[in-house]
Amino acid sequence: MADIVIIGAGPAGISAAEVLCAKGLRPVLIDEGAQAGGQGYRRPADDLALDMNRLMGSEAGKYTALHRRFEMLRPKIDYRPRTLVWAIDGSQLHLLRDGQAQTLDFDKLLIASGAMDRVAPLTGWTLPGVFTLGGAQVALKDQGCLIGSRVAFLGSSPLLALAAKQYRDMGAEIAVIADTTPLAAKVAALPALLRAPRTLRRGIWYMAASLRAGTPMLHGVTPVAVEGENRVEALVLRDKRGREHRFACDAVALGYGLKPETQLADLARAEFAYDPGFRLHLPKIDGLGRARPGLYLAGDGVRIGGADAAEASGALAAHAILSDLSHPQDIEVVRRLARRVKRLRNFQRGLARAFAWPTAQIAALSDSVTLCRCENVTVGAVRAEMCREFGPIEVNRVKAMTRCGMGRCQGRVCGPALQEIVAAEAGQDGALAGRLRGQAPIKPIALAAAGYPT
Ligand SMILES: Cc1cc2nc3c(=O)[nH]c(=O)nc-3n(C[C@H](O)[C@H](O)[C@H](O)COP(=O)(O)OP(=O)(O)OC[C@H]3O[C@@H](n4cnc5c(N)ncnc54)[C@H](O)[C@@H]3O)c2cc1C
């Protein structure tokens, strides 16, 4: 039995553990990765000679500081790397550590599970050579390899220009950076973006760096197809005037911003509500990150806010735990953290407008496009099922009828696009289309680990 368990050793989980340790507590910190740091501050294996200072650019100082802080924290906590939490049952976690099944009971649980890419399907996105934008970054930061030698970046996300710069610095040629949101939307979102001027400056600097390098940058495009015989050979786009452009490339990185990884929060019985700004169903939390008694959520895993907001919200949730354990609190520190989290998360709302999720483009996808890669379900198959008399109009029913979202990824990849297709087809908004319920195991594991005879 552990008193306090934190899932996720990214900035949110690490700063939460620091606050708890400062009060003499010894939390368990679990992460499926071999190294702490999370996604943004991912640390490569020690034997990989990667120049992280160069790769992290203006964020190198924060990267180094977080890892230094973690090394100081490590002896004071029960740190369990390479440990996947694949299910939560009441107050018990089901873990898989180095292939071995374990359980762990907890009294208080803080989930800081981070985010993953939100992707919109297009014709040809199942070809070898198409990666998510985050996957392209993981390849670089975790394994020191590039997804291709001439890479096209497609989607709508501030991370497109950042990842393109990292790829360029590491020797790749950038075929194009293509954003589906018009430039005018970015200009309109400027007042909200000025809430975090430093981050805004950094974003503009990355875009300027791409222009200086001569990389074609398009805004307001409509993706047509990824083309290729057996692997990626080109990306075809339509510009605002309806003209088609073909960019030869050997890889495509696809990213439409991030979405919180909420499956664990779901299994831990958090309540959800639809957020029309992000067009996502998100767990409900109070101002400190409490989802219900004994359950706390922090970082990008509950609201996309970026690394700084993740750190502050992790510390804030740790203060909520301390308060619930009747530890005396410094109210001014808590207020300051809450203000910081609010400001940075509001900045992300501005980003969500400047780099919009392309609902209309998804609704207009042709029937032949693969929607669920795991189960090979097309957009047309979903529409056909919904068109039947008394056909389903809610995503979990659609999943039951078509197997869309029922495969290895459990709908983590196709879920957001499925929600838009269902909403458009039924003529309702995303709230009524519903959300795919979290199911254990949240990631693929061996049946034997789940206790099934093999
Ligand atoms: C692929 C990717 C790349 C990114 N790159 C950048 C970047 O270059 N620059 C930038 O500013 N932002 C980047 N971000 C944004 C980044 O999410 C945040 O800025 C920041 O890392 C959020 O911190 P966090 O602590 O909330 O989550 P994270 O840093 O994501 O940490 C969450 C941790 O939880 C662990 N975890 C999740 N689920 C489980 C489970 N079931 N069992 C055990 N452990 C689990 C993960 O292994 C991870 O280490 C990236 C995001 C993604 C998804």
Image: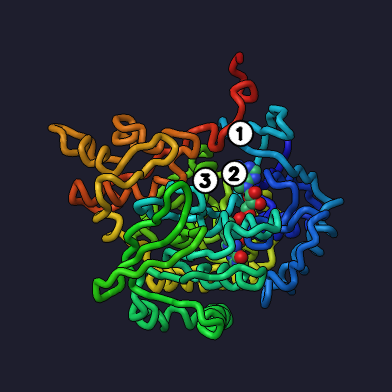
Write down which quadrant ligand 1 falls in: bottom right
Residue receiving disc 3: 292
Residue 271, quarter of picture: top left
* Most distant residue in the left direction: 389
Do the CB atoms of the residues marked 2 and 1 lie less than 8 Å apart?
Answer: yes
Figure disc tally: 3
| Element carrying mark 1 | loop
* Most distant residue in the top direction: 453
Q: Is residue 167 left or right of residue 410?
A: right
Residue 383, quarter of picture: top left
| Element carrying mark 3 | strand
Residue receiving disc 1: 91
Q: Amino acid at mark 3?
A: Arg
| Element carrying mark 2 | loop
Q: Amino acid at mark 2?
A: Gly
Do the CB atoms of the residues marked 3 and 1 lie less than 8 Å apart?
Answer: no
Of 316 and 37, nearer the camera is: 37
Residue receiving disc 2: 294
Q: x, y percentage for residue 275?
A: 37, 58
Q: Amino acid at mark 1?
A: Ser
Looking at the image, residue 236 lies above or below residue 230:
below
Res 12 label: none
Q: x, y percentage for residue 394?
A: 28, 40
